[in-house]
Amino acid sequence: MVISSYTSQKQSLIDNTLSLNYASAVQMSQTLDSLFYSMQQSLKYAANYFPDMDQSNTKELNSTLDLVRNSSNFFNSVSLVDKAGVIKSTSPYSQASVGHHVSSHAAKEAVKLRTSYISEAYQTPRTKRRIVFVSEPIFDSAGEYQGTIGGNIFLQENNILSLSFGSQLKTSNGSYFFIVDKKGTLLFHPNTNRIGENVSKNEVVQKLLVNKHGKEQYKNLAGVDSLAGYYKVPSTDWGVVIVSPTQTVYDQLNHLSVCCCCTPQFLS
């Protein structure tokens, strides 16, 4: 009877943890989706500032771009690029960049596509930063393409993701979450040194890469038995994974068993 009760309680705790992690993954995915929508809307709104602006007035151009960056916490840096791919201004201002053609594949792609754009995570050749680039095209009143305004998220530094989710990054019982892109590369993780690492061999990540979502018990790449809930972010095709070491369930169960054993039993 005791063994049966223990087994039943253990499975109940495992099922509850899996359900909670899945619900959290869904909620975080929805929050991320809304966050990127807000980023794109802020850039669309900002794009209206520039078509009629005298772009030879560098002081006004720079202050406007500063206003765009500082009006939200969305981006670590913002840049304005003309239709030829030449950087007109940046915020924070970078003399080394202004006047030069964009060099990253993401920025070149944004200029070429002339539409809303969210890049894959990439590493810059000069600063070695890992970045996600979000951009919106700029059109004048006649509908002629004028350039692109884009914002960078520096993945290994304080950013909108850490600001929004940092408090949930890792809990006292060892639960944590991570985010991967559509290739299985880590974009967000409690250990920032792992950002950029490809974890596509992870069983749960493999499910995300084929557009599955769910909850399951599995062993991670370090061989730790874990309970995970996972879900895709529609706007970016990223995957969110919430993980709890299975050992935390056993620890809870052992604690409950000790409490029950220590409770005085009164006879009537």
Image: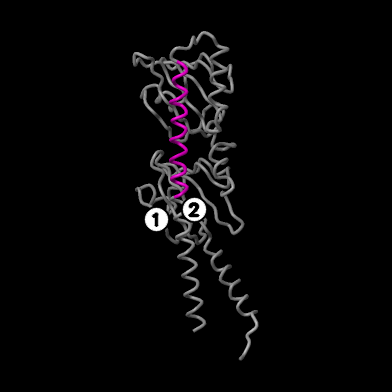
Question: Picture coordinates of residue 257 (x, y %)?
Answer: 59, 76
Please, what secondary structure does the residue beneath circle 1 have? Answer: strand
Q: What's the residue type where badge 1 is placed?
A: Gly
Please tell me whether residue 253 is drawn above or below residue 146 in the rendered image. Answer: below
Q: Say left or right for 194 vs 140.
A: right
Nearer to me, 189 or 222? 189
Q: What residue type is labelled 2?
A: Ile
Q: Which of marks 2 and 1 is nearer the N terminus?
A: 1
Q: Residue furthest bottom?
A: 268
Q: Is residue 147 left or right of residue 262?
A: left
Dot 2 crowding, Cα within 10 Å, few <14, some 14–19, many 20+: many
Q: Where is residue 116 in the image (x, y as percent from the top left)?
A: 39, 28
| Residue that label 2 marks | 242
Q: Residues within 10 Å of mark 1 (few under 14, many from 20)?
A: many
The vertical placement of 262 against 72, above or below, is below
Left or right, 97 with respect to 237, comes to right
Q: Quadrant of the C terminus?
A: bottom right
In the image, residue 14 above or below residue 206: below
**Are circles 2 and 1 on residues that touch, CB within 8 Å?**
no
Q: Does the magenta stretch include residue 70?
A: no
Give the image location of residue 59, x and y in percent. 58, 12
> Gap in Å between the C-alphas at discs 2 and 1?
11 Å
Query: Residue 45 lies in magenta, yes or no?
Result: yes
- Examine the image and state in which quarter residue 265 appears: bottom right
Residue found 46% across the figure and 26% down from its top: 43
User: Which residues fall within the magenta stretch?
Assistant: 27-50
Q: Which mark is residue 214?
A: 1
